[in-house]
Image (tube, rainbow, N blue to C red):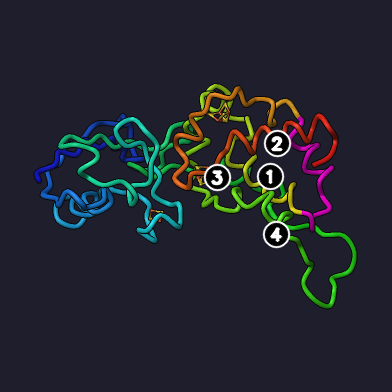
Amino acid sequence: MRVKLRIKRFDGEGDREPYWAEYEVEAEPTDRLLDALHAVKWYQDGTLSFRRSCAHGVCGSDAMLINGRNRLACKVLVKDLGERITVEPLRGYPVIKDLVVDQTAFFQKYESVKPYLSPEGEPPARERLQTPEQRERFDDTTKCILCAACTTSCPSFWSNPDYVGPAAIVNAHRFLFDSRDAATAERLAGLNGTDGVWRCRTVFNCVEACPRGIDITRAIGEVKKALLLGRT
Ligand code: SF4
Ligand code: F3S
Ligand code: FES
């Protein structure tokens, strides 16, 4: 099939404003959008810039706004997008070039929740045991690939870029509900501030955007409940 791609581009240099560029490519209906972007970059215009790595929905690097929705270019098929496809960079972060945004602030928020296990005491001689039920409590939030599709689809984040955002909360949840972790109070205190978890207004855009199917609003609700109870 013949596909028209309308791509929002930005040079990142000089005074030129962002502009729309159009390309036509031949694609199989079962090609991913990433294949069509490669067809442009490799055979028509090598200056087109976008991030990608694994091409299989694992690395999280190719999230972009596709036909008005945040998705991974490597997970969406051309046949499901139609013959005219619009592609824009994620919203809410400065554009460096074309579809590449500056994710510095995104990863600062991620780091702010201390996304690593902080157990108490000396390391044991063998692994710290956990029951299947204890593991189940945070199973969903281990699936995050840090693609930023959730945070950059959130109206609360658009109106206040200081909001910690759903991605960081998901990653806080992953450790808050881990029975081996001992930094609960510290993590909860960090999420209780003006720009913390209470900024979430349960808009659900994040759930719709997540390519991993994580129940983000449930995770956010559990963190809010933990704050009210003072425990997980
Ligand atoms: Fe991406 Fe989902 Fe993780 Fe958000 S929660 S960063 S949408 S994988
Ligand atoms: Fe935003 Fe998701 Fe909450 S879209 S307001 S973080 S439910
Ligand atoms: Fe890795 Fe799409 S290229 S998730």
Residue 64, by quadrant, is top left
Q: Position of residue 190 (x, y in %)?
A: 76, 37
The span shown in magenta is: 179-192
As drawn, the label of residue 132 is 4
Residue 81 vs 144, above or below: the answer is: above
Q: Position of residue 114 (x, y in %)?
A: 72, 50
The alpha-carbon separation of the residues under discs 2 and 4 comes to: 19 Å
Residues at badges 3 and 2 in contact (C-beta under 8 Å)?
A: no
> Label 4 is placed on what type of residue?
Pro
> Label 2 is placed on what type of residue?
Glu
Callout in the foreground (3, 4): 4
Say whether residue 81 is left or right of residue 69: left
As drawn, the label of residue 104 is 3
* Residue on which the image places disc 1: 173
Q: Earlier in the sequence, mark 1 or mark 4?
A: 4
* Residue on which the image places disc 2: 222
Q: Residue at image x 39%, y 61%?
A: 54
Q: Position of residue 205 (x, y in %)?
A: 48, 29
Callout in the foreground (2, 4): 4
Q: Residue at image x 21%, y 50%?
A: 36
The alpha-carbon separation of the residues under discs 1 and 2 comes to: 8 Å
Query: Any magenta on residue 190?
Result: yes
The alpha-carbon separation of the residues under discs 1 and 4 comes to: 17 Å
- Quick one: label 1, few (<14), some, or many (20+) residues within 10 Å? many
Residues at badges 3 and 4 in contact (C-beta under 8 Å)?
A: no
Which secondary structure lies at badge 4? helix
The alpha-carbon separation of the residues under discs 3 and 1 comes to: 21 Å
Q: Earlier in the sequence, mark 1 or mark 2?
A: 1
> Label 1 is placed on what type of residue?
His
> Label 3 is placed on what type of residue?
Thr
